[in-house]
Image (tube, rainbow, N blue to C red):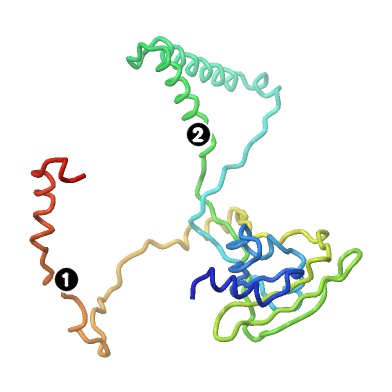
Amino acid sequence: MRMEFLQRSFWAATRQDLDCFVVDNNGFILISERPQEVGRFLGEVDGALVTQLLSMGVFSQVTMYDYQAMCRPPTHHHSASQPLVSPISAILSATRWLMNELLLLLLEWRAWGSWRGDHRAEAKTVFHHSHKHKKQDLLQPCDTAYPVFVHQTAVREANGTVECRACQKAFVMQQVPSSNLLLLVTDRTCDCSIFPPVLREAEEVKYNASVKCDRMRSQRLRRRPDACHAFHPEENAQDCGGASDTSASLALLLLPLWAWVLPPQLLR
């Protein structure tokens, strides 16, 4: 079934004064009246609804860890008096500034063999862009933790209300049979903007000295298994392989040769 046909049938069967969503078991929107919401997490769109579903046990929050993430290093803000306290810091900063100015001067004097003004300006632009790009892309390996929301399969349907400031937002949840999809219908007229969105942002995991050492000791290098299991008794070996018996077509091999020999007028 095509997604466009499913959406048309879905909107034809629902009232347009309601907010209707079809989400998967992790809360990601598959069908919405607003196309820009498709693919997003439901908590980003309706934080009040997801907060209520979590409190009712319809969804549960699980913390996942990414041990191969990249994070920005912490920025250290120095006071203006620090170069006065540390003369070495002032000398290093001045040397760095002089090296940058010298490189720009070499670019202006066509040190790269560019004798045109536009090429010189382009070279300066490339230098500034690459220098800025290196500063922005300075990342370091880290561990991050991020929340994942999972539907509790024991809860197939639920309904309730969300208490907002001046109204109550009613909702109904129904699991789609023989699938991992959920149909959610909410009241569009009630404003529940007092609830913040539920986000899935990753946060860096900070370790103390002892835990960090244990974490590094626990990392093991990957190695191949001691034994190779290349056979299974329930597998029919005759159904596998056969790629070595594949032969190339002679017509396909001669096609590039004909394209090179024939005049270009015949190929248009």
Of mark 2 and mark 1, the one earlier in the sequence is 2
Q: With 200 as the anchor, is 131 left or right in this view?
A: left
Q: Secondary structure at mark 1?
A: helix
Given this view, does label 2 or label 1 mark the residue nearer the observer?
Answer: 1
> Is 67 or 152 nearer to us in this picture?
152
How many numbered marks appear?
A: 2
The C terminus is located in which quarter? Answer: top left
The residue lying furthest to the bottom in this view is: 234
At label 2, the amino acid type is His
Residue 133's label in the rendered image is 2
C-alpha gap between disc 2 and disc 1: 46 Å
- Residue 168 drawn above or below residue 256: below
Mark 1, other Cα within 10 Å: few <14 / some 14–19 / many ≥20: few
How far from the left and from the top, in percent, is residue 165? Answer: 90, 63
- Residue 75 drawn above or below residue 144: above
How far from the left and from the top, in percent, is residue 227? Answer: 26, 76
The residue lying furthest to the right in this view is: 166
Residue 243's label in the rendered image is 1
At label 1, the amino acid type is Ala
> Is 217 or 259 nearer to us in this picture?
259
Q: Secondary structure at mark 2?
A: helix
How far from the left and from the top, in percent, is residue 205? Answer: 60, 56
**Residue placed at 65% from the left, 86% from the top?**
154
- Residue 91 sits in which quadrant? top right
**Residue placed at 47% from the left, 63% from the top?**
218
Q: With 26 as the anchor, is 236 left or right in this view?
A: left
| Circles 2 and 1 in contact, beta carbons < 8 Å | no
